[in-house]
Image: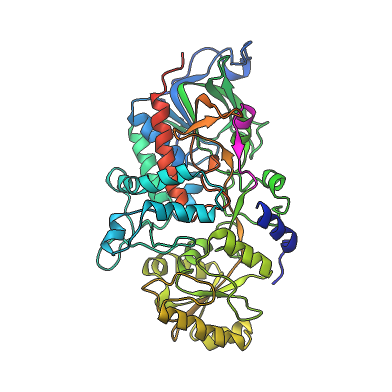
């Protein structure tokens, strides 16, 4: 299959380093009648001569991390505002699968699944090549269950259940224990929508079309506020109308990653040019991160950029493929159509799986029969994938062989794989075979081509255990907090799938709580 990706050069680099719209609102952060932004100049300290708006906590970004930070800050009594660059609320979180890696949950216990904090941390560290901040991984493991229960009790999020009415727990690539829980709604808006509704009830303004281009620090080094450019064109920080917002307690950076920013990602991996597609929404660019660095924030791990291996080359962007494909990796097999053979464990972590596909040079074929497609995935995601033209249905395996001109070796591979499912041991690649997996049967079969796309940027600003942003001297910057994909160090070389939800919610809540308690500002 043709691809414009220079796989040899790309793989070398990988191996080495590799939506609810909200109006402005009048509650909180009331405009200050001190003159328009266009007339504002900076004082000798570098601060604006006048602020257009003022509040206690300003949150930059409206994905899981930003929304949960604003929720906790407001709940703690802080006058809070969200500023969002795009015209809608939710960021990448709203279009994500919403899958949540939860350690020692009631859902696991109900199914007799053993787990531990140490196992969770070990899986994260293995995927991250040991570059992770282990203490932060441990916090995610320790707080994941309480945070998941919080989504149920406080936000009212519903999670997928089985025929017995028990919450489903699903296998996920790179996890050596089954611990991932899937929202009943099927995507991240299961959390962004109720969080947005809660914030609306609390009177927290969520001001869209506001790009953050500067963080202001006073003579003591404290972050005092931000400059936003209203109605900036595209992702150009040189456009838009400037406004200055003072934060009396703190600023929380939750702007997400820069996967959609081709110029930025190419500085860290030149092979990730515009021929390499990306799953992110258009706002996943680097302006806020760059502004934080200009203000003295230390950035780490910027050259570790993750590809999602469960994407389809037959559509652009995130599309309909990932939600369907990713849920099948545990229950089917993926083969090289040239040889008819598997090349990697389908449940390998994203770095290992993506590297194997790119090194192989052509899209793999994911093969799964109807009985092995999880019920929730069959009902929610299969038909959209078929309608999008990325998944094909065949009555028998012989029809699959004919359609893709698979070599004779495929039949032998097919038989071997079924043997591994029956025995529960993958003798070729060590894939964890789920207990509910069945040998591939008579059909019908569903076939999808898979090829990696840029998905997550592991790098961002460095934070301490209190979510405070650190400067280049490894000292906390007063009044400056961060959470989610805007931070670096948590996931190391490769984020383990479904741990992003834990990261964003656990650290988002923490950042909001800490910012609300910050009382050093004058």
Asked where in the image residue 166 lies, by quadrant, the reply is bottom left
Question: Where in the figure is residue 351, as x and y percent of width and height?
Answer: 58, 58
Classify residue 240 by image quadrant. top right
Q: Is residue 275 left or right of residue 345?
A: right
**As rendered, which of 465 and 222 lies closer to the eye?**
465
The residue located at (69%, 60%) in the rendering is 11
Rendered location of residue 378, percent (x, y): 41, 70
Q: Is residue 51 magenta?
A: no
Q: Position of residue 225 (x, y in %)?
A: 53, 22
User: Residue at image x 34%, y 38%?
Assistant: 198
Q: Name the image quarter holding the N terminus.
A: bottom right
The answer to which image quadrant residue 219 occupies is top right
For residue 353, above or below residue 47: below
Q: Is residue 235 left or right of residue 331?
A: right
- The scheme the figure's colours follow is rainbow
Residue ID at (46%, 82%): 418
Q: Residue at x 40, y 52 (%)?
A: 118
Instruction: Locate residue 401, reporting x and y percent.
Output: 58, 85
Q: Nearer the viewer, residue 312 or 222?
A: 222
Q: In the rendered image, is residue 216 in sight?
A: yes
Find the magenta span and give its range: 292-303
How many discs appear?
0
Q: As drawn, is 504 to the left or to the right of 235?
A: left
Vertical order, 60 against 118 (above or below): above
Q: Is residue 203 visible?
A: no
């Amino acid at each position: 299959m043709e691809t414009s990706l220079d796989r040899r050069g790309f793989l070398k680099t990988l191996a080495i380093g590799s939506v609810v719209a909200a109006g402005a609102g009048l509650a909180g952060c009331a405009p200050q009648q001190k003159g328009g932004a266009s007339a504002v100049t900076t004082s000798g300290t570098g601060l604006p001569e006048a602020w257009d708006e003022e509040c206690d906590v300003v949150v930059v970004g409206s994905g899981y991390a930003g929304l949960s930070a604003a929720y906790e800050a407001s709940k703690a009594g802080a006058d809070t505002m969200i500023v969002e660059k795009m015209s809608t609320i939710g960021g990448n979180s709203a279009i994500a699968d919403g899958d949540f890696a939860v350690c020692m949950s009631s859902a696991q216990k109900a199914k007799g699944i053993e787990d531990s904090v140490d196992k969770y941390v070990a899986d994260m560290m293995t995927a991250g090549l040991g570059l992770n901040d282990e203490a932060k991984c441990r916090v995610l493991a320790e707080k994941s269950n309480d945070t998941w229960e919080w989504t149920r009790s406080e936000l009212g999020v519903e999670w997928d259940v089985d025929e017995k009415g028990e919450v489903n727990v699903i296998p996920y690539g790179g996890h050596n224990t089954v611990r991932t829980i899937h929202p009943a709604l099927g995507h991240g808006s299961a959390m962004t929508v109720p969080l947005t509704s809660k914030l609306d009830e609390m009177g927290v303004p969520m001001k869209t079309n506001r790009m953050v281009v500067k963080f202001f620090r006073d003579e003591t080094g404290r972050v005092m506020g931000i400059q936003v450019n209203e109605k900036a064109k595209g992702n150009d920080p040189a456009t838009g109308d400037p406004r200055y917002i003072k934060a009396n307690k703190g600023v929380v950076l939750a702007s997400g990653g820069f996967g959609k920013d081709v110029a930025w990602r190419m500085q860290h991996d030149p092979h990730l040019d515009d021929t390499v597609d990306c799953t992110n929404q258009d706002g996943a660019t680097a302006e806020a991160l760059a502004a934080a660095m200009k203000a003295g924030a230390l950035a780490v791990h910027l050259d570790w950029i993750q590809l999602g291996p469960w994407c389809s080359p037959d559509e652009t962007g995130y599309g309909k493929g990932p939600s369907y494909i990713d849920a099948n990796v545990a229950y089917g097999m993926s083969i090289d159509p040239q040889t008819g053979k598997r090349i990697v464990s389908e449940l390998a972590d994203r770095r290992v799986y993506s590297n194997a596909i790119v090194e192989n040079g052509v899209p793999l074929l994911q093969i799964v029969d109807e009985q092995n497609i999880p019920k929730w995935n069959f009902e929610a995601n299969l038909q959209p994938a078929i309608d999008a033209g990325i998944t094909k249905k065949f009555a028998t395996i012989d029809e699959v062989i004919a359609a893709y001109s698979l070599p004779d070796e495929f039949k032998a591979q097919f038989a071997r794989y079924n043997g591994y499912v029956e025995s529960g041991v993958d003798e070729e690649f060590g894939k964890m075979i789920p207990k509910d997996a069945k040998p591939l049967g008579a059909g019908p079969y569903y076939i999808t081509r898979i090829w990696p796309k840029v998905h997550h940027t592991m790098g961002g600003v460095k934070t301490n255990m209190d979510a405070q942003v650190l400067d280049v001297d490894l000292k906390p910057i007063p009044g400056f907090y961060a959470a989610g994909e805007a931070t670096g160090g948590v996931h190391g070389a490769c984020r383990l799938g479904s741990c992003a939800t834990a990261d964003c919610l656990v650290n988002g809540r923490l950042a909001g709580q800490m910012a609300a308690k910050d009382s050093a500002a004058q």
